[in-house]
Image: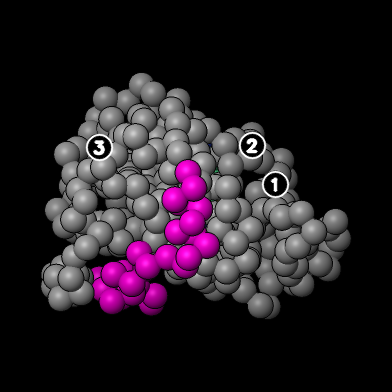
């Protein structure tokens, strides 16, 4: 149910958020999506794909900082990073801040998302598409990982929800290939939904991923735009110590990296692995 003044998100049945639309800036069918970009007073510019809110100018930093700096700082010496999805450019912006990273491959299914976000959300990528370390590939993420031979230290899946084109990025086959592409002690992370409303996503991911890695768990952050409470990020690696670094060690790495953040802090990083009991139960039930 959408009209010119109000935009209703249609992701969850019978529950959701709406925005007062100051101005609709872009609304078209692209190759993969119905892409909407509109201006709001509440959260600045907002992007939706097929009726599901993807990002807003006002709160994007929470999601992008947590999905990037937690694995990169935990890894400690990542040189090669793979981003799957991420067409708004926010993850890329945060990855390029890591000077030790030598090569970044980003695989996005729809060029129109990249192009429109460069135009309407310039601060999301903030020039990162011009970084010489980047190889941008326009391809389905599952197709890419199936045939890829390169190895990576960190793989970040900044995907849509597990419906439509994004569904394959939650499949066992996708997880298995991502694990194959990781160097020893590499780390895979992915957005994994809001467990209060999408509890199956946690247990499904554990069921599909746990046999490939020694450690499969989640960390969390509250992102206002992803309604329903905390959002989970899956964390998968053979390095079982990677999530247990002390705050002092994370502080040292954070300072050495010279990062300036608005949400991420080393203390929050460590605390983000503490999960509510209902999420722990979903993990255990898998
Ligand atoms: N942060 C958002 C969220 O939590 O819902 C998602 C951000 S948006 C940048 C996700 C991106 O994944 C979109 O640009 C979309 O085109 C891309 N995507 C979806 N399915 C994909 C696939 N199969 N392969 C590669 N990219 C995909």
Say which of marks 2 and 1 sits in front: 2
Residue 95 at x, y percent in the picture: 31, 56
Residue named by callout 1: 50
Question: Foreground residue, 39 or 194?
Answer: 194
Q: Residue at 69% of width from left, 63% of height from top?
A: 38
Residue 164 image label: 2
Give the CA distance from mark 3 to mark 2.
26 Å
- Is ligand 1 within 8 Å of the beta carbon of the residue shown at mark 2? yes
Q: Residue at 53% of width from left, 33% of height from top?
A: 168
Q: Relative to 116, say whether 176 is above or below.
A: above
User: Residue reaching furthest top?
Assistant: 147
User: In the picture, which quadrant includes the N terminus?
Assistant: bottom right
Give the CA distance from mark 2 to mark 1.
9 Å
Query: How many C-alpha atoms fall within 10 Å of the one at disc 2: few (<14), some, or many (≥20)?
Result: few
Residue 144 at x, y percent in the picture: 40, 28
- Is ligand 1 within 8 Å of the beta carbon of the residue shown at mark 3? no
Q: Residue at 29% of width from left, 69% of height from top?
A: 270
Residue 251 at x, y percent in the picture: 18, 75
Q: Secondary structure at mark 2?
A: helix
Q: What is the number of callouts on the image?
A: 3
Query: How many C-alpha atoms fall within 10 Å of the one at disc 1: few (<14), some, or many (≥20)?
Result: some
Of label 3 and label 2, which has the lower sequence position?
2
Q: Secondary structure at mark 3?
A: strand
- Is ligand 1 within 8 Å of the beta carbon of the residue shown at mark 1? no
Q: Which residues are magenta?
A: 258-286
Q: Relative to 145, say whether 256 is above or below.
A: below
Residue named by callout 3: 182
Q: Is residue 57 visible?
A: no
Of label 1 and label 3, which has the lower sequence position?
1
Q: Residue at 64% of width from left, 36% of height from top?
A: 164
Q: Relative to 242, say whether 58 is above or below.
A: below
Indicate left or right for 257 with 221 as reference. left
């Amino acid at each position: 149910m959408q009209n010119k003044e109000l935009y209703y998100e249609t992701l969850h049945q019978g529950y959701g958020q709406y925005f007062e639309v100051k101005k609709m800036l872009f609304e078209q069918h692209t190759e993969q999506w119905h892409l909407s970009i509109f201006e709001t007073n509440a959260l600045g510019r907002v992007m939706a794909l097929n009726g599901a809110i993807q990002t807003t100018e006002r709160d994007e930093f929470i999601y992008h900082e947590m999905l990037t700096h937690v694995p990169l700082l935990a890894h400690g010496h990542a040189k090669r990073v793979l981003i799957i999805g991420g067409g708004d450019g926010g993850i890329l912006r945060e990855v390029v801040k890591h000077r030790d990273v030598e090569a970044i491959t980003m695989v996005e299914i729809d060029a129109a998302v990249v192009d429109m976000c460069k135009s309407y959300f310039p601060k999301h990528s903030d020039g990162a598409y011009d970084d010489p370390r980047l190889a941008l590939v326009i391809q389905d993420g599952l197709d890419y990982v199936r045939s890829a031979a390169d190895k990576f230290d960190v793989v970040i899946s900044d995907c849509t929800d597990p419906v439509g084109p994004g569904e394959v990025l939650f499949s066992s086959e996708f997880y298995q290939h991502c694990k194959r592409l990781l160097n020893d002690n590499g780390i895979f992370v992915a957005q994994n939904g809001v467990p209060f409303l999408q509890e199956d996503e946690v247990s499904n991911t554990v069921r599909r991923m746990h046999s490939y890695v020694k450690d499969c768990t989640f960390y969390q952050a509250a992102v206002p735009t992803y309604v329903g409470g905390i959002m989970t990020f899956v964390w998968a690696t053979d390095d079982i110590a990677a999530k247990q670094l002390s705050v002092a060690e994370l502080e040292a790495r954070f300072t050495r990296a010279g990062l300036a953040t608005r949400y991420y802090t080393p203390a929050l990083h460590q605390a983000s692995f503490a999960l509510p009991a209902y999420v722990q139960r979903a993990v255990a039930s898998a």
